[in-house]
Amino acid sequence: MSDLSGAFAVVLGGSGFVGSAVAARLAACGARVRVVARDPGTPAFPAETVAADLTEPGAVARVVAGADVVLPLVLYTGGGTWRAAGAQATDAARVNVDVVATAAAAGKTVIAAGSTSQVGADAPEVITGAEQDRPGTEYDRQKTAAEAAVLAEGGVSLRLPVVFGPAPASLDRGVVSAMARRALAGQPLTVWGSGGMLRDLVHVDDVAAAFAAAVAHADRLAGRHWLIGSGHGVPVVELFTLIAATVAEQTGRPPVPVTSVPPPEHASPMDLRGLVADPSAFTAVTGWRPSRPLADAVADTVAGLLGPQGR
């Protein structure tokens, strides 16, 4: 575990799914942590909390005052989804781009969250971080714009794959938790088409460890983006079958079926292709690598959704 004793880290969006895990990890590594969110709640780890609307003028500068490192892990979900489009795109950009860019310009070390999908649908199935970006969705375009602002100020961007783990429904809109909830409700799990597209999955605790490693090695990582991933792809149909089997094991019920349906109209080309991130460049600098085997991490996610009463 990285030793961050003496560091003062401000996590913007620190009550969210990824943000709360990162804030907890930084605190466990010895950092002084400030959690900033509209409703920061009461963290289960030592942290200062600040309630703020970060889109208001001057709010970001105020909450990052005195920080050694700022982690803008905000994400617009005002429409109940990260798939901002149409009229929602402007509102999403105020969070996904403007808040991050303002943090980047505050004169602090900034470590932001990008997405491996920024490369676009024409990239190779296995990416290394050297590919040219061709973002094809509004979400990826906003992530790319925010990242450009961070890197221009000498910051760091960690591009994340599919992140999953136990979390309340209000926080985690990820595919693993969504399918686990469907299976717990006895509903079939549906794959788009054959379900053969590969997904690279990393447990949220491993992602939090990657951010802690980035804080510890920020000087060596500065000025570029880095891929976070397992380096291994799992076909969606196999992932959903694993989820169904895990729910069955933990509940004592038969596994729900995994069925195929046509892709919906809102599916993007990125949804229908595989993407695997090779994290070896980041590992070479920081020593980080994911530690949670997929089956164990899925079991942990299902157990978290069941709660003590369901185990």
Image (cartoon, rainbow, N blue to C red):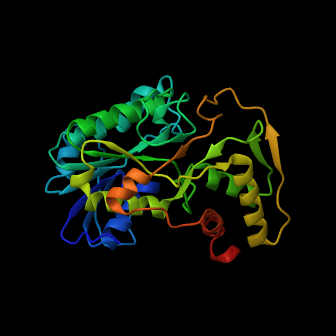
Q: Report the residue at 47% width, 41% height from top.
A: 116
Q: Nearer the viewer, residue 277 or 245?
A: 277
Q: Seen in the image, is 244 located left or right of residue 145?
A: right
Q: Position of residue 229 (x, y in %)?
A: 49, 52
Where is residue 265, by image quadrant?
top right
Where is residue 95, by image quadrant?
top left
Q: Nearer the viewer, residue 38 or 253?
A: 253
Q: Seen in the image, is 156 located left or right of residue 173?
A: left
Q: Position of residue 152 (x, y in %)?
A: 22, 35
Q: Quick check: can you spot residue 55?
A: no
Q: Quick check: can you spot residue 238?
A: yes
132 to 157, vertically: above or below: above
Where is residue 298, by image quadrant?
bottom right
Q: Report the residue at 38% width, 51% height from top.
A: 281
Which residue in the rendered view is the most extreme toward the top?
Answer: 86
Q: Position of residue 17 (x, y in %)?
A: 47, 56
So how many labels did they put on this image? 0
Q: Which quadrant of the figure contains the C terminus?
A: bottom right
269 to 164, vertically: above or below: above
Q: Which quadrant of the figure contains the N terminus?
A: bottom left
Q: Report the residue at 37% width, 53% height from top.
A: 282
Q: Position of residue 124 (x, y in %)?
A: 55, 35
Q: Nearer the viewer, residue 187 or 291?
A: 291
Q: Seen in the image, is 307 located left or right of residue 43?
A: right
Q: Nearer the viewer, residue 97 or 231?
A: 231
123 to 238, vertically: above or below: above
